[in-house]
Amino acid sequence: MTPQQLRTALQEPGDAKLFIEGIGPLEKRGEARKGRLLIAHGAGAGQDSTFMRLLRQALSENGVQTLAIEFAYMQRMREENRRRPPPKIDGLIEEMARWCDVVSQPNSPALWLGGKSLGGRVASMLAARDGAAGLALCGYPFHPPGKPDKTRLAHWPAIACPTLVMQGTRDPFGTRDEVEGYDLPASVSVRFLEDGDHDWKPRRISGRDQADLIAEGAAGIAATMAASR
C-alpha cells in the first residue's frame, strides 16, 4: 500500500501486517489505550526474534499499540538469507524519520519512539535531533561490550522528551554499576531488570525467566507512557 493508504489502515481496529511501497513492512499490534510506540529492532535480529515478539505481545496486553518496523538492511538479510552488518547510523536515523512522517497523523495518541539496542539508539539520536513525544529504550547500548570507556552518550544532553530506559542489571552494553555513574538528563529515567542480560534473560539461579522480565519491562513502559499523557 501507499503511505496515504497506510494512514487509513492505522485508523482501522485490529492488528495488521502491512507493507508500504518504497519503505517496507510494518506490523500494527494492540490498541493505544496508554500510548503508541514506533519500535525498531536490534542490530542482528529483526521483529521476529523471540525478544521482540514477546515484548510486542506484552506491550499490547498493557495497553500500548506498537508499530514495528524493520530497517532496509534487515529486509535485505531476509532476502539474501545471510547476515550483514548494519549501515552507518545516520542512514538508519533517516529511515526512522521517514517512518515517523508516514505514521504520524492528527487526532491520534502522541507517537513515542523506541526499540531494542541499536533500534533504541537510533530512536534516541532522532529524538535528540528532531524531538519526540517520548522514548522507550530497551537494552540500550551505552557502550560496546568490553569497552566501557567508549560511551555513546554525546547526543544525550539534547534529549528533552520523557525517556525511559529499561536495562538488565548484567547487560554487557551497560551494567547497573556503569549506568548509575552516568550524568543523564533530568528527563531520563532508568529502571533495572534484576539479573537480566542484554536480552533480559536472567540466570536460572534467579528463579525468574526472560518472559518475567519482559512482562515487567512492558508494564513499566506502559505506565510511563500513560503518566505522560
Image (cartoon, rainbow, N blue to C red):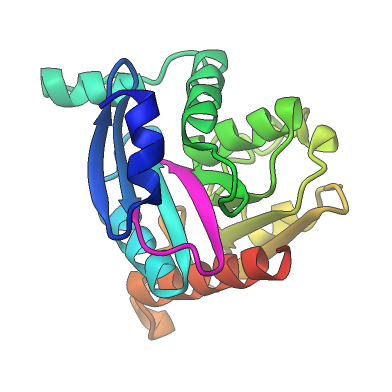
Q: Is residue 121 visible?
A: yes
Above or below 42: residue 80 = above
Q: Residue at x 49, y 42 (%)?
A: 117
- Assign the N terminus to one quadrant of the image: top left
Q: Residue at x 63, y 63 (%)?
A: 225
Q: At which x and y percent is residue 122?
A: 56, 31
Please state which of residues 58 and 202 is positioned toward the viewer in this rendering.
58
Above or below 75: residue 208 = below
Q: Residue at x 56, y 25 (%)?
A: 97
Please state which of residues 221 and 228 is positioned toward the viewer in this rendering.
228
Above or below 180: residue 112 = above
Q: At which x and y percent is residue 130?
A: 72, 27
Horizontal relation, residue 70 to residue 65: left or right = left
Q: Residue at x 49, y 35 (%)?
A: 118
Q: Is residue 49 visible?
A: no
Please state which of residues 169 and 214 is positioned toward the viewer in this rendering.
214
Horizontal relation, residue 171 to residue 85: left or right = right
Horizontal relation, residue 143 to residue 62: left or right = right
Please tell me whether residue 21 belongs to the stretch shown in magenta: no
Q: At which x and y percent is residue 53?
A: 29, 56
Count the numbered circles shown. Answer: 0
Magenta-colored span: 29-41
Above or below 130: residue 47 = below
Which image quarter: residue 131? top right
